[in-house]
Amino acid sequence: MDNTRRIVVNGQEIRERVVGKGAPVLMIHGWGANLELLQPLAQNLEGFDYRLYMLDLPGFGGSAEPTAPYTIFDYAAFCVAYLDLHRLEQVHYFGHSLGGRIGLILGSEHSDRLKSMVLSNSAGIKARQPLSSQLRLRLYQSLRKGLNRLGAPAIAQDLRQRYNKRYGSPDFQAASEVMRATLVNVVRQDLLPNATRVQVPTVLIWGDADTETPLWMGEKLEKAIPDAALIVHEGAGHYAYLDYARKTAAIMNALYSNDET
């Protein structure tokens, strides 16, 4: 039975899937993903007593794009509004990558809404860019500002398109204008200060072969979050929770059920 439906949260149309019975769990996907990529994990949680709330965040999967660029704090506020719509006072949380960023905000600024949290390959720590990349970006920004001041916006726009085409990430290239601006907003935010203020028990799941959010980021988060444990899946990449779906589900249940007793 397909439990997927469309709902409206704060005027934003999204797609959600709710399955199971028991303690509520909010599950949030990563950038460029959707709730289908949470489904294998949900299937491995079927043997436990949880009601799983999965959704496509605004701008992803079957959900409409936001009318204006979001920040990561907007996404966190959206998740709180989603909980309010379903009248969920407290939930367990699972977040992957972008969902990990959201979890760091929820765990620090809305900790009263979470019981415990599992983050897989969480983004949120800014990696220092090589000096050459920093200099290239500064030169590009200086040239754009200069062209606009000289009354040559068309040339400045052409420079912008060329720069983005050559140096933009695959996620950036694939995104619409509003989602490109959203991506820039999201990746610029350093959430390490939030990590130090997380107030719920947290398990971090990582792959030692992750090249997008390398293992050192997980190790740094483990040190920053007051009550955190890091579990590393050998050979797993950025989707460690999918590479080890059954094991991840067992880890989630161990944490979540402990909090229910």
Image: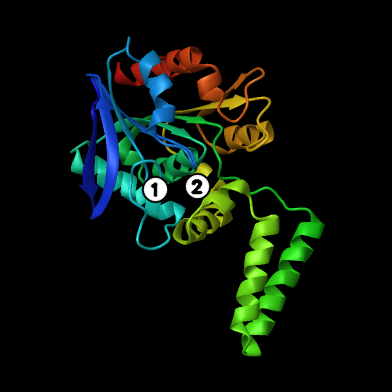
From this viewpoint, is residue 23 visible?
yes
Picture mark count: 2
Q: Amino acid at mark 2?
A: Asn
Label 1 packing within 10 angstroms: few (<14), some (14-19), many (20+) = some
Q: Amino acid at mark 1?
A: Glu
Of labels 2 and 1, earlier in sequence is: 1
Please identify the residue farthest to the right as the structure is shown: 132
Q: Residue at x 81, y 59 (%)?
A: 132
Q: Position of residue 244 (x, y in %)?
A: 53, 16
Judging depth in this view, the residue of 239 and 213 nearest the camera is 239
Q: Quadrant of residue 52?
A: top left
What residue would you read off at disc 1?
Answer: 109
Q: Position of residue 7 (x, y in %)?
A: 21, 43
Quadrant location of the N terminus in the rendered image: top left
206 to 8, vertically: above or below: above
Q: Disc 2 vs disc 1: Cβ atoms closer than 8 Å?
A: yes
Residue 194: numbered disc: 2
Q: Is 216 left, or right, of 93 in this rendering?
A: right
Q: Secondary structure at mark 2?
A: helix
Quadrant location of the C terminus in the rendered image: top left
Q: Is 134 left, or right, of 237 in this rendering?
A: right
Label 2 packing within 10 angstroms: few (<14), some (14-19), many (20+) = many
Q: Quadrant of residue 20?
A: top left
95 to 154, vertically: above or below: above
